[in-house]
Image (spheres, grey):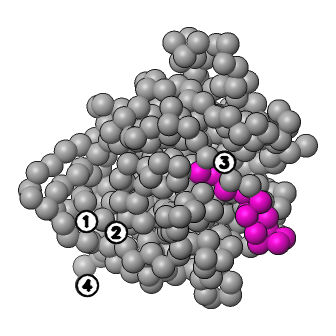
Amino acid sequence: MKPMLPMEKYFGKLELVHEFYGAMPTGVSVSETGRIFICFPKWGDDVKFTVAEIVGDTLQPYPSFKANVSNQGNITMSFISVQSVVADGRGTLWVLDTAAPNFSEPIIGGAKLVAVDLKTNTIRRVYTFTEDVVLPTTYLNDVRFDFRVGKAGYAYITDSSSKGPGAIIVLDLGSGNAFRRLNGANSTSPDPYFLPKVEGEILMNRNKDGSTSPFRLASDGIAISPDGKVLFYCPLSSRHLYSISTEALRDRTIPGTDLPYRVEYWGEKGASDGMITGAKGTIYAGDYENNSIRKILPNGIMETIAHDPRILWPDTFSIGPDQYLYVVVNQLHRQVRFHYGKDLRQKPYSLLRMKIDEFPAPTFS
């Protein structure tokens, strides 16, 4: 009998939390009481509800089925196509609605950030955006919070546009005023020299008619330091990690032309979709090219903590009160738009977790 040839080494202890046999999920968030929330943007799958809670082994529309029925007569109080859900650690689930099903232009007035009270399971407040903040090209992607500044805190949102400028959208939760920062800056834009390779193949848009184009998406992954003073972010089409002072982002007396000089470069961390920060200041990020999860310590040292063939596109991360890192794995790169109209995804999609012995970064004092 011939000996087996050497093979690639896989490592990291991953546990299966939930299998998805319906629509493809993107976002996950675990509340301070351990409730798990998931979102399903409308990218072509049969999405029965765009926000859900995992209850036992089932998915239940959240906060209600009615809120998940897109209502043209009341688009501010109904979810259209949700990309991200974030539990803030103090009783609220924040729902980021792109209002852009199938990556269309956002429905005017429909793009919003919604605060849902986790005790009453009702919508408490809705933040909408003006047309100079959510552009026709905007795709609201992910959001982080800090309730230690301003009257009611601030939210920082990535615009991961594929056709227009990337940006960080800054939202004053007290006044509801929002504005774009680092609009079209190099750090929020796709790396023009980036050539993504997933499962050994170059990832690019491959249309049904045979035409092709590069895969280009702007600022996507976002994480905030435990003290709320530093925002980390990365374009989806890039391997680079950047950061900037949140104070500089909020300070509108700093001209947009000067703000890029406040950006710090952290080097290559691999190509990431989602990112999250732990209470010790560790950044956790996916590496979708290498089926891996990486951590970046506050001193910049990077370490791969999981490398597993099941990590087929690590999308969004969340850290639970159980000190587990949760990650949605959704095979995004196998979608129709990358394979000449053929859907190569294999169900189930999965929610995985691994023990990290670190709590989520706090959002309040």
Instruction: Between label 2 and label 4, give the one nearer the viewer.
Output: 2
Q: Which residue is mark 2?
A: 44
Measured Cα–Cα span from mark 1 to mark 2: 9 Å
Secondary structure under badge 1?
helix
Q: Which mark is residue 336?
A: 1
Measured Cα–Cα span from mark 2 to mark 3: 26 Å
Q: Nearer the viewer, residue 207 or 291?
A: 207
Q: Are the two marked residues, 4 and 3, in contact with CB atoms closer than 8 angstroms?
A: no
Sequence-first tag of 2 and 3: 2
Looking at the image, residue 224 lies above or below residue 105 = above
In the displayed structure image, the side of residue 139 where residue 354 appears, left or right: right
123 in magenta:
yes
Q: Which mark is residue 1?
A: 4
Secondary structure under badge 2?
loop
Q: Magenta part of the protein: which range? A: 112-124
Q: Residue at x 25, y 71 (%)?
A: 343
Sequence-first tag of 4 and 3: 4
